């Protein structure tokens, strides 16, 4: 069996060299080759002594990047899959990259983003020392079904590593805070920061996992995340070891209470979502033995990357922005709609959130459209909504049911026709919301709008 | 007033199933919706209602609801025989069969219809779309599930012209007896199928147009055309 492993490693290593020569980086190919030849590759592979895993529905990538940046800032050599996939093949590729040709691991610390559905393929072999779970929310219906399913799936996988893996959990998530009762658990909590989130019509969780009673909140941060309790039993936000107080999103600082000590830290972003990601990072660093002063210094020197996923150009006093959205995902779509509503500028929205129409056959299960809160877009500052793509008529119906006046809605089957309908007056911004997997599409639509207006002005 | 009882809404709308009831209510001022939670005895037990709706559940809650409904089995049969409208969507359809098999476990269900379901939780979730025919109407369905129904001793809701039926080999989908309709299709089934929504309203003697009927029919026609002929870049 081990012979297979060495053959797999050798071929994978050779493929790394081949990819370098042909300038193909950041691919999962070497790992995919290794796993194909030796399905137990992850089990046999030499691994870093300390492995930190990051999982959860939203915020995995942001958190993984942040942890890597901070640990590198602290002088550690960190192996990670940030350039590749969060599946078995992506993590195997990272391990291969970290090994010398004799299969000896060169790194002592690894930070791996881990796909939830891959837990059973990853946890038993990687046996992470720490696993941060950001949250569990509505995700792809086709792959992840519903949050309770993912909860059970992760929980079963965690039983295998009960004596090894310490969980770092968001105490304000009614779903994920209940994970891993047999594992050592560190809870992170936060005081109310007047986030004033909108109420979602399809919440991620609505009833207590213990008794089925209604979940209620003392205060909420976003979606179903907040200081919760069950109406009928004692199920509630667990007591946090690290508790953030005096959260000043605008002023960019918060204080973390640990026992009797209180330490102020800079906030890396002005969103409550990232404050929670940063809090998990601080908890991890404390558990790894970093002093608070050191953590303060480290946080003063890093940035959260790619938080707003926004790119803007200005023409004639109007900002034309591209904003990555995850179409077909109710929770992230609702979050973006909430952002568009709260961002005060008067704007036109160009929705390019259809499944990528690479194939000719539709496979979209359109339930997500009704789980997502299009109602949030029913605001005065949303001036017009131009819906692009083959689902435009279905989206229009959804917008009408959400209460949006018909005269604000335009449908175009072909996204290249969007430019004919964008307002030229009475707005401050245009947002093109594009499917995150087809970023170029969003930029193309945005640039076409600007070019079209420039052309009109030249001909005047 | 026509009364629709929405059973266990706190459990039964994981994929926006609440839109089925909402859509009917918003279409007609004659409709009153009674939401019954899991702590309450359903209204239909002691009173006649015009329609009962139950939607999709998580696997755990599906088992809880099987136990909750068990004492009312005879009453449900009585109502079906009487012609009360039932709409059952998603995996709630399994509750009306004999049992659900999950590896070695057997979860007893109402046994009103002669079929059983089997779960395959370790297998990749099944996702597909289908087109079915019922009473001269074409019906669009969305499915995403871990389980299938086996047995052929029941009257199907639709004959399929595209997609798979109750199990992967079946060409029929759902159950239809008197005014009882059950389908595996998820989510806002009636919004996606406005013709069938009108049919349901007519069963309750309501003859008003649907809310945004023109747009709903247009969206339905585009969807149907896509499922038959593939995605078009331009409008027809
Ligand atoms: Zn409870």
Image: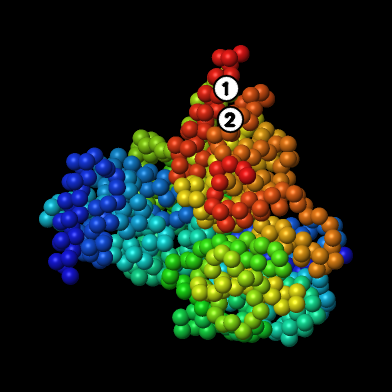
Mark 2 on the same chain as mark 1: yes
Label 2: state its secondary structure.
Answer: helix
Establish if A7 lies above or below A313.
Answer: below
Q: Nearer the viewer, residue A239 or B143?
A: B143
From the Cβ of disc 1, is ligand 1 less than 8 Å away?
no
Q: Is residue A335 visible?
A: no
x, y (%) of residue B216?
Answer: 71, 52
Q: Are there few (<14), some (14-19), or many (20+) residues within 10 Å of tag 2?
A: some
Question: At 69% across and 49% down in the image, what residue appears?
Answer: B218
x, y (%) of residue A339?
Answer: 58, 40
Question: At 31% across and 67% down in the image, what residue appears?
Answer: A124
Question: At 65% across and 46% down in the image, what residue appears?
Answer: A393
Residue B46, picture quadrant: bottom right
Question: At 22% across and 63% down in the image, what residue appears?
Answer: A37
Residue A350, picture quadrant: top right
x, y (%) of residue B76?
Answer: 74, 81
Establish if A206 lies above or below A99.
Answer: below
| Chain where mark 2 sits | A
Q: Are there few (<14), some (14-19), or many (20+) residues within 10 Å of tag 1?
A: some
Write down the residue under mark 1. Answer: A453
The C terminus of chain A sits in image quarter:
top right
The reply to whether dot 2 and dot 1 touch (C-beta < 8 Å) is yes
Q: Nearer the viewer, residue A397 or A191?
A: A397
**Marking on residue A419:** 2
Q: Is residue B82 visible?
A: yes
Question: Could you tell which of marks 2 and 1 lies nearer the N-terminus?
Answer: 2
């Amino acid at each position: 069996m081990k012979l297979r492993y060495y053959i797999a490693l050798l071929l994978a290593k050779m493929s790394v060299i081949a990819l370098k020569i042909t300038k193909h980086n950041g691919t999962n190919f070497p790992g995919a080759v290794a796993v194909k030849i030796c399905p137990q590759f992850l089990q046999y592979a030499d691994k870093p002594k300390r492995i930190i895993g990051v999982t959860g529905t939203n915020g995995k990538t942001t958190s993984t990047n942040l942890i890597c940046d901070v640990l590198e800032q602290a002088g550690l050599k960190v192996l990670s899959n940030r350039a590749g996939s969060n599946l078995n093949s992506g993590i195997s590729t990272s391990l291969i990259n970290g090994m010398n040709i004799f299969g000896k691991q060169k790194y002592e610390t690894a930070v791996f983003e881990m796909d939830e559905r891959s837990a059973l393929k990853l946890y038993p072999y990687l046996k992470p020392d720490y696993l941060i779970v950001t949250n569990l929310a509505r995700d792809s219906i086709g792959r992840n079904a519903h949050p309770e399913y993912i909860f059970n799936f992760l929980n079963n996988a965690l039983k295998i590593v009960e004596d090894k893996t310490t969980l770092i959990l968001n105490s304000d998530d009614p779903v994920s805070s209940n994970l891993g009762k047999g594992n050592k658990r560190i809870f992170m909590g936060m005081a109310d920061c007047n986030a004033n989130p909108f109420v979602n019509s399809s919440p991620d969780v609505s009833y207590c996992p213990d008794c089925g009673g209604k979940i209620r909140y003392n205060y909420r941060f976003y979606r179903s995340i907040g200081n919760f309790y069950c109406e009928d039993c004692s199920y509630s936000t667990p007591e946090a070891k690290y508790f953030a107080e005096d959260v000043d999103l605008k002023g960019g600082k918060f204080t973390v209470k640990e026992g009797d000590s209180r330490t102020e830290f800079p906030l890396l972003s002005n969103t409550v979502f990232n404050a929670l990601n940063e809090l998990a990072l601080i908890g991890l660093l404390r558990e790894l033995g970093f002093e608070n002063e050191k953590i303060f210094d480290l946080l003063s020197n890093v940035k959260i990357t790619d938080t707003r996923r926004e790119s803007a150009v200005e023409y004639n006093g109007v900002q034309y922005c591209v904003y990555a959205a995850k179409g077909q995902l109710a929770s992230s779509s609702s979050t973006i709609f909430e952002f568009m509503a709260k961002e005060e500028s008067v704007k036109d929205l160009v929705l390019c959130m259809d499944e990528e129409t690479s194939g000719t056959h539709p496979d979209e299960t359109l339930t997500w459209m009704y789980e997502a809160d299009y109602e949030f877009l029913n605001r005065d500052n949303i001036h017009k909504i131009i819906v692009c793509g083959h689902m435009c008529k279905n989206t229009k119906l959804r917008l009408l049911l959400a209460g949006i006046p018909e005269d604000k809605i335009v449908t175009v089957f072909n996204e290249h026709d969007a430019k004919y309908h964008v307002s030229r007056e009475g707005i401050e911004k245009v947002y093109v919301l594009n499917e995150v997997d087809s970023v170029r599409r969003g930029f193309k639509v945005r640039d076409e709008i600007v070019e079209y207006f420039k052309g009109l002005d030249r001909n005047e | 007033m026509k009364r629709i009882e929405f059973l266990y809404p706190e459990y039964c709308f994981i994929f926006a199933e609440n839109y089925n009831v909402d859509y009917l209510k918003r279409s007609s001022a004659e409709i009153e919706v009674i939401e019954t939670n899991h702590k309450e005895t359903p209204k239909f037990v002691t009173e006649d209602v015009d329609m009962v709706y139950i939607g999709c559940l998580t696997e755990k809650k599906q088992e809880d609801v099987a136990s909750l409904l068990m004492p009312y089995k005879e009453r449900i049969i009585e109502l079906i025989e009487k012609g009360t409208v039932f709409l059952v969507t998603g995996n709630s359809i399994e509750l009306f069969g004999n049992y659900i098999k999950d590896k070695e476990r057997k979860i007893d269900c109402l046994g009103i219809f002669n079929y059983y379901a089997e779960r395959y939780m370790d297998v990749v979730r099944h996702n597909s779309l289908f087109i079915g025919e019922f009473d001269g109407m074409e019906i669009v369905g969305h499915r995403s599930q871990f389980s299938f129904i086996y047995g052929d001793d029941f009257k199907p809701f639709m004959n399929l012209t595209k997609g798979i039926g109750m199990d992967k080999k079946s060409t029929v989908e759902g159950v239809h007896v008197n005014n009882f309709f059950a389908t595996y299709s998820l989510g806002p089934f009636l919004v996606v199928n406005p013709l069938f929504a009108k049919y349901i309203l007519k069963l309750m003697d309501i003859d008003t147009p649907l809310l945004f009927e023109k747009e709903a029919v247009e969206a339905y026609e585009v969807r149907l055309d896509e499922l038959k002929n593939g995605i078009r870049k331009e409008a027809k």
